Image (spheres, rainbow, N blue to C red):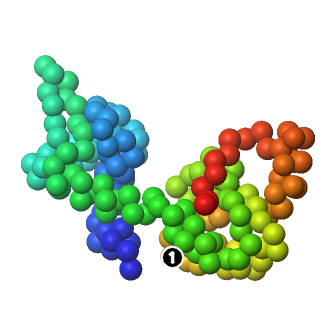
């Protein structure tokens, strides 16, 4: 079981939602209302939890007159929070480990936008077993809840389809 799964079981979802805001952009300063809006937690609850986080030095607070800005602490506590929370945001690294065991894969591209729940992949290779890739995707989903959609192509098919303009969305090579 992962640290992030244990945190989800033990910690109130509102706390997780607020901390996610900071972990996604660790160097950014946020206003109270902004944190409340992004986390979908009421302003009163957000304020109460931020007071606690500041007191415990997980979050830094800066005051500029009546305005208050909050950011993830640069202390060891802030780093630990970021590490624990971000472990759930690395499912593609886990998947690349699984796919490295599948023979015939030459390259893997992310296609389109990656969300917290899913990603689409284009897998290039020769004689790649769709069942092996499906098994890796299923294992990842069972462990993390992250869903992967994929298409397996040869390099020549991919090049021809690219020339035809069939891959207009953003793509990024993630393997090797």
Q: Is residue 118 above or below residue 113?
A: below
Residue at numbered disc 1: 143
Instruction: Give the percent coordinates (x, y) of residue 86.
Output: 38, 58
Residue, far top: 65
Please identify the quarter of the rendering in which residue 97 is found: bottom right
Instruction: Give the percent coordinates (x, y) of residue 109.
Output: 67, 54
Q: Is residue 11 above or below residue 142?
A: above
Instruction: Give the percent coordinates (x, y) of residue 71.
Output: 24, 39
Please identify the quarter of the rendering in which residue 145 is found: bottom right
Judged left or right of residue 69, residue 37 is: right
Q: Nearer the viewer, residue 67 or 2?
A: 2
Do we see residue 52 in this rendering?
no
Which image quadrant: the N terminus? bottom left
Do we see residue 47 in this rendering?
yes
Residue, far left: 55
Judged left or right of residue 54, residue 103 is: right
**Dot 1: element:** helix
């Amino acid at each position: 079981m992962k640290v992030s799964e244990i945190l989800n079981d033990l910690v109130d979802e509102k706390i997780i939602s607020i901390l996610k805001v900071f972990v996604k952009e660790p160097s950014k300063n946020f206003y109270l209302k902004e944190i409340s809006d992004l986390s979908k937690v009421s302003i009163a609850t957000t304020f109460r939890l931020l007071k606690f986080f500041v007191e415990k030095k997980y979050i830094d607070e800066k005051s500029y007159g009546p305005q208050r800005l909050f950011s993830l602490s640069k202390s060891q506590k802030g780093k630990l929070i970021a590490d624990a929370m971000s472990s759930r945001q690395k499912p593609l690294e886990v998947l690349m480990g699984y796919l490295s065991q599948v023979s015939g894969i030459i390259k893997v591209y992310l296609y389109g936008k990656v969300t917290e729940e899913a990603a689409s992949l284009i897998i290039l290779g020769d004689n790649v077993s769709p069942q092996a890739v499906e098994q890796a995707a299923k294992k990842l989903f069972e462990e993390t809840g992250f869903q992967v959609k994929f298409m397996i192509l040869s390099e020549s098919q991919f090049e021809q389809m690219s020339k035809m303009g069939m891959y207009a969305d953003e793509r990024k090579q993630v393997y090797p």
